[in-house]
Amino acid sequence: MAEAYQALRVERAEGVLTLTLDRPDVLNSFDALLKRELLAALTGAGRERDVRALVITGAGRAFSAGQDLRERDETGGAVDLAKTLRRDYNPIILALRRLEKPVVAAVNGVAAGAGFSLALACDIRLAAEGASFIAAFGRVGLVPDSGMSWFLPRLVGPGRAAEIVFTAEPVDAATAERIGLVNRVLPAEQLLPEAQALAGRLAAGAPLALALAKRGLDRAQRSDLTAALEYEAQLQGIAGRSKDHAEGTAAFREKRPPRFSGE
């Protein structure tokens, strides 16, 4: 079933929600409409029990080129970029990280600026062989935003992150895989099917356990070992009391696939 969005394609299949940024004529750059629709779709996905995993990709030859600068030109006068980030972009990034369901980015082409940041905010990144990543902010006299300064060093280390940001040079898909920026590189025609297949495997997992695991991974990035161990124990206590844990152990004993309910 497709939903009534104008700048975003929304498709569902077997627990997987695929969100396709759909402004291919402008490399899926973000205007006000696309930002509103993407936030609405992410927020809605969080409320829907039938949605267990997501895929985010782009239409045409780009994932997203970032902010549509033409939109800013059309407004005339100075733009308060801090206000724009707090109102438009930061809620999208926070919605992605607070969404207690796995999100796979299928990076089909260039991911630049806020488009790069969007891919970074996903849990898993697959890339087409022709994809590239550009921290384009410096090219227009700006600094990384939409979470790039937080995510990028954690994925590739501070030195590589500094080089990517300071030079604003493209990182090709093969390099991105080598430095840990993406999980896997695939031929273009295999990218979306493989991303959806991966999301499908995740959707078949235990929803509560995946949600708690995502919480734990996020918390661990800002915790010391002692705090991380304690938080793991708290999360495991919740998971251990769940119906999904009981179902998983029963299925293991009975040598059958588990039927997880998310409870």
Image (spheres, helix red, strand yellow):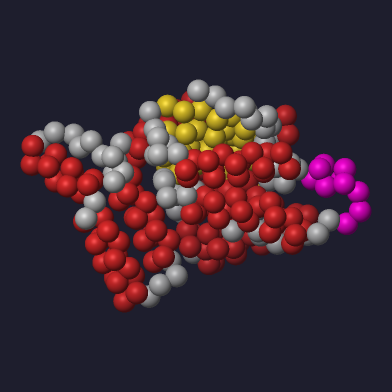
Q: Give the range drawn in magenta.
A: 69-78
Task: Report the number of numbered marks.
Answer: 0
Q: Can residue 195 be seen in this view?
A: no
Q: Residue at x 83, y 47 (%)?
A: 72
Q: Residue at x 14, y 46 (%)?
A: 249
Against 176, residue 257 (above or below) is above
Q: Farthest residue in the right direction? A: 77
Q: Residue 195: x, y in percent? A: 43, 34
Q: Residue at x 67, y 32 (%)?
A: 7
Q: Farthest residue in the left direction? A: 253
Q: In which quarter of the image is residue 205?
A: top left
| Secondary structure that dominates the magenta span | helix
Q: Residue 187: x, y in percent? A: 47, 30
Q: Which residue is drawn at 14% across and 39% down?
A: 251
Q: Can residue 91 be seen in this view?
A: yes
Q: Is residue 11 magenta?
A: no
In the image, taking residue 222 as reference, residue 38 lies left or right, namely right
Q: Quadrant of residue 3?
A: top right
Q: Residue 207: x, y in percent? A: 33, 45
In the image, taking residue 136 as reference, residue 133 lies left or right, namely left
Q: Residue 231: x, y in percent? A: 32, 68
In the image, taking residue 198 as reference, residue 191 lies left or right, namely right
